[in-house]
Image (spheres, rainbow, N blue to C red):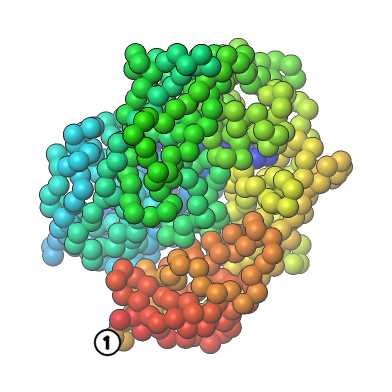
Amino acid sequence: MNRRCSRALSLSAVAICCVQARAQRAACRGALRDPSGTAIAGAAVTFCQDPSQTFGLAVDRVEITTDAEGAFAAELLAGSPYVGWAIGPVDVHGERWITSVCNLPCAGRQVDLVAVRRARPHRVTLRGVTPWRDHVPPALRLLVDGRHPLTFDRPLSGDGTFELGPWPGFDVAFELVDDKRQPLCRVESVAEDVEVVEFPPLRVVDVETVDENERPVAGATIAVWPRRWEPCYFDCDPLPPGELTSTPTTAATGERGRVSLPLAWAKEPRDVYYVGVAVSDPLGSLLEIDGKVGELPYRLELTAADPRVLRCLDGGVPLRGWAGVGSSSGFSAAGALRHGELRLAATSELVRPVTYVRLEPTDGAPVRVCVAEALELAVDLSRLTARTLAVQDPEGRPVPFAQIVIANRYDVWAREHDRCVTDAAGRVELRCSDDTWDVLAVTDRAMGWSRITPGDPSAIVPVHMLPVGLARLRVVDGDGRPVPDARLDPVVPRWHERPADYLVQRVALHLAFSQRSDHDGMLIVPMPYGEFREVKVVRGKRRANGRTIRPGDEIVTVELH
């Protein structure tokens, strides 16, 4: 069995300290079959760790090949959510069996995959690449469900027509990246029947850094983040993505304290970028770049403030490993600990009360920490409270492999901080700071909620799962043939009873929009809160007119045109 895996030191995106079993990895086993039940040998099966677990570093990725019986066994990191897909070998017609993207894989679980269709590579014309070539050498990255690289980046010399695919699911994102693998621009949700992909136009913005005496600051690192918007529902993820999943684009100022930033700029109001600056000692201001670009460069003023230091301890003993800090704006600073300390030089946003810390030592079991109010930027693991989340069904039986999102309750909002997966006994061990934490758990058929409050002495926190209503749709084409990989339109339809709690609302929507139709065209949609009105079912350019769908046993036939 051929196995490839790559893993960077993981900065766990966990809001509460989550301690998994001492075994770092466990096998996710299963078999790949076609719709008739025949085993598919020699298929490439890929598992990708959820990006929210890595704090912007490389995700854990495991690639294996099925044996003669279609079986596979992938060693995955315990406690982390993964997605998986499979692409079969080329047959005599030049086609491959392909699965949808599955959100069930995790360490220790049995996950069988069923191919939903056969496809071959197709030709796609790329436009808008050439302007980027004049600034940086661009390469093309295909992102399965908008987040997971399908294969290696493909260098591009400019616009042209290329043979691409096939890919799992039906939609991928096309992304241009530079020679440092940093994203330049992207096009969302490109279907396999799309023949032309045009990237957003390039706009060069000049930024200069000066100190409080108007003197230019050379060698300052400029970091650029796109403005955050509501979550996109193109992916197969049943939970919202983590707060700090975007990787900033960075550049350094020259001798005159200036730098030119090439940015993707489409004609939409959401094209706003945040720009922050970090140097060795001072803290930089925060800048927002929008469409009102003047003749003069944008200016970032630096003040001579003492550097801030994050101290990470375990019972007073300095920890080794990686650490990172973020704030409510989503900015972050991360790096290797030196003698238990991380020197921070970033925007002033990092000193707000909602600042939190994430940490994972390089040895031993994964230890993930979040401190919601780290004004002094000091973390001591020995001061955190040990708890266990026990996920149960209405009869009190454990719910294995439930996916969990953990959020800090700040004012009326629940700010999402982390993700994890319960073990085979339905449990996750935690150590957490004395704050209010919301816990939401989901499976493909149930949803549960719990809360940890300050001063709560409970060592075991139950999370009671309740079944959710299911809408059953059979998706067909004009000839009555089943259509696989169809989904609800991610443009949010009218929801009859939308929950008031924002985090619960996001989780419920992601749970509904993460579903795809199988090889028989069956699309089963979990609906925790009433009916959807004016909903559309789509696959690529095909779509069905809006209609109302409700939970129930009746199978509703939807015809795509």
Residue at x 32% of width, y 44% of height: 264
The spot of residue 543 in percent (x, y) is 35, 76
The spot of residue 322 in percent (x, y) is 54, 25
Q: Split into 4 quadrants, where in the image is the N terminus?
A: top left
The spot of residue 81 in percent (x, y) is 52, 48
Q: Is residue 163 above or below residue 99?
A: above
One can see residue 521 in this view: yes
- Specify the amino acid type for callout 1: Asp
Residue ID for mark 1: 479
Left or right, residue 389 beside residue 126: right
Query: Within the image, what quadrant is residue 495 found in?
Result: bottom right
Dot 1 alpha-carbon crowd within 10 angstroms: few under 14, some 14 to 19, many 20 or more? few
Left or right, residue 482 beside residue 494: left
Q: Split into 4 quadrants, where in the image is the C terminus?
A: bottom left
Front residue of this view, candidates 248 and 214:
214
Front residue of this view, candidates 141 and 266:
266
Query: Within the image, what quadrant is residue 342 found in?
Result: top right
The extreme front residue here reads 295
Left or right, residue 149 beside residue 124: right
Q: Is residue 255 above or below residue 290?
A: above
Q: Mark 1 falls on what kind of element?
A: loop
Residue at x 70% of width, y 34% of height: 353
One can see residue 341 in this view: no
Residue at x 33% of width, y 34% of height: 295
Front residue of this view, candidates 329 and 81:
329
Query: Within the image, what quadrant is residue 253 found in?
Result: top left
The spot of residue 316 in percent (x, y) is 74, 16
Residue at x 54% of width, y 35% of height: 331
Q: Is residue 67 above or below residue 548?
A: above
Q: Is residue 247 above or below residue 462?
A: above
